[in-house]
Image (spheres, rainbow, N blue to C red):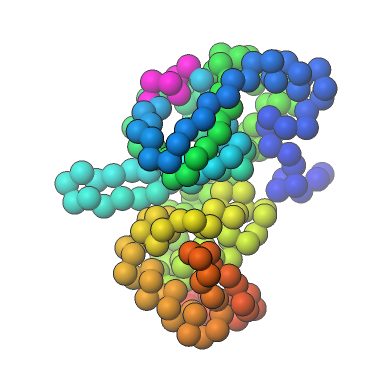
Amino acid sequence: MKNIVDLPLPFENLEPSLQNRINTQAQIVTLNRGDDVYFADKLKDYVYVVKKGKIKSYQLNIENGKEQTLYIYSNNHIFDTVIILDGEDHDVCYEVLEESTLVMYPIEFIRNLLYHSPEFSRKFYLYMAQQMRYIEEMLTDVSLYPTAERVIKLILQDFKPSNIFRFNILEGLSHTETANLIGTVRNVLERHLKNLKNENMIDIVNRKIQVLDAEKLLKKVNLLA
């Protein structure tokens, strides 16, 4: 069997007649950075796929202001796949981090594909499995591992194409947004980045982290674990 991480995402590279059916249902939505986006009701009617840009999904504790980023959607990521299955509300917040282009499909059309198209449903459920594994790993990291290790893992994952939910997402992110990805705060993140830079493992140019020595980073993760 082909490795799961090499499989195309659910809306791409399908059998031609199925691909054409999906393409005819697609509508394009463009969002600007900072747009106030409220998806709660829309997600019951439409499925959204990010084709360009970045949109953050997060939970916020209003009482203490603490924020935890769940996903940064980009690169063909599908919004909130659970709603497609159960139709229930999902109380999360969204923020447009940069100009983004989304493709939207009627949710009932997608549900019909899940029931009647083995090719589409197989890819969709494999995609969902990767989402579940990502959330499990994120919760485990936040609960069990020190911040220094979480920072290094995030940097390494950003360069790993098989990690579809963290690959190439750090470019252009503020340190505050990056910290929210791993359940910490900006000053703690910046201290760890400074240490890694002083040890010549990374460099930071125009807000983009560059890995100078991946082997050293891997060894440091093993030492911290």
Q: Quadrant of residue 120?
A: top right
Q: Is residue 6 left or right of residue 152?
A: right
Residue drawn where x is 44% and y is 81% of the image:
195
Q: Quadrant of residue 34?
A: top left
> x, y (%) of residue 177?
39, 55
What is the quadrant of the N terminus in the image?
top right
Above or below, 129 against 103 in this view is: below
> x, y (%) of residue 21?
73, 16
Q: Residue furthest left?
A: 63
Is residue 49 at least partly visible in the picture?
A: yes
Q: Nearer the viewer, residue 90 or 42?
A: 42
Residue drawn where x is 58% and y is 70% of the image:
210
Q: Residue furthest bottom?
A: 199
Q: Is residue 149 magenta?
A: no
Q: Is residue 41 magenta?
A: yes
The region drawn magenta spans 40-45
Q: Is residue 185 left or right of residue 221?
A: left
> x, y (%) of residue 71?
47, 45
Q: Nearer the viewer, residue 101 or 70?
A: 101
> x, y (%) of residue 77?
58, 39
Is residue 183 at least partly visible in the picture?
A: no
Residue drawn where x is 58% and y is 59% of the image:
158
Task: Say how many tags the image has.
Answer: 0
Residue drawn where x is 58% and y is 40% of the image:
52
Above or below, 49 against 58 in this view is: above
